[in-house]
Image: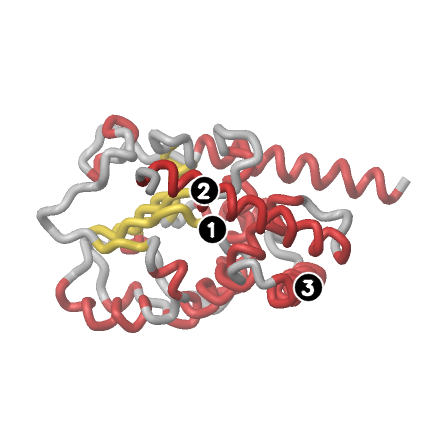
Amino acid sequence: MGNVSEKDEFYEKERKEREKKCLELMKKEFPSHDDLDLIRFLLAREYEVKKASQMFQNYLAWKRDFKPGNISIEIFEKELVQNRGYFIGHTENKSPVFYFLAKNHFPQEEWEHSVHFGCLIHDAFVRLAEVPGSLTFCGIIDLKGVSIDNIDMKLIKKGIEVYQDFFPERLDRCFVIGLPSTLVGLWYVIENLFDDRTRKRIKVLKDDETLPDLFIPHLLPKECGGTQELSHDEFRKIIAAHYSHSEDEQKSNSS
């Protein structure tokens, strides 16, 4: 019998061959779409082509109707200045890192804006990736100082639904820190809204646990034991480029 690494190589080769065959079948139905996007949906449906194709079709219909990320620059700024979410750099393996400061979130009537904002952030991570073509990111959810006033179950449910149905396989890993003892029960309710594949990528750190070594210490914000001051500068540059590109497309289509 071969050693473990030989077995791993065998199974990885087998997986890639299966992925290639499944991708070829999906490309017949969606020839103009990016391979990496189609692979994400195949992974989400464990290479069952029929289910993955239906999921992707649903995504295209939602994208056509909802127009994800379609908010004005003014609304984007309004969302940004609430200081809930930050891009804080990259992990050791070059994945963008999103830091969510939950104590700064409060439920609001126009919750759809936050969904659009989240979709815009997903697009921004593609531009922020240090590895060309990479679609995944890591997350840190900071629950220190959170009270029941910060809990927005309507947005949480909708956000999880949108992520799992339309942005599958984008999350590499996510770490939850500072979970208050008073909200442990509620966290279990929220955790059960995730599917198994996503749930396995989310880890709640205990008080005596630190963020893993994949996070570069000096890039972490002070809130996580690092030295970095939180800033929206990098996000603003990326989003400005996004809006500039959108305006150019509109001018091109109208001419």
Residue type at numbered disc 1: Glu
Q: Which mark is residue 180?
A: none
Q: Nearer the viewer, residue 44 or 48?
A: 48
Disc 3 or 1, which lies upstream in sequence? 3
Residue 77 appears at what percent x and percent y? 51, 45
Q: Specify the color scheme.
A: secondary structure
Disc 2 or 3, which lies upstream in sequence? 2
Residue type at numbered disc 2: Phe
Q: Nearer the viewer, residue 198 or 148?
A: 198
Which residue lies at the image location 31% right of the left edge and 66% below the top edge? 191
Task: State the residue position of label 3.
Answer: 57
Which residue lies at the image location 36% right of the left edge and 49% below the top edge? 84
Q: Which mark is residue 10?
A: 2
Q: Left or right? Give the position of 76 relative to 4.
A: right
Q: Can residue 66 be seen from the camera position used here?
A: no
37 shown above or below 127: below
Which residue lies at the image location 65% right of the left edge and 66% below the top edge? 50
Position of the N terminus by quadrant: top left
44 shown above or below 228: below
Task: State the residue position of label 1.
Answer: 79
Label 1 CA crowd tier, 10 Å (few <14, some 14–19, many 20+)? some
Label 3 CA crowd tier, 10 Å (few <14, some 14–19, many 20+)? some
Residue type at numbered disc 3: Gln
Q: Nearer the viewer, residue 120 or 135?
A: 135
> Dot 3: what SS?
helix
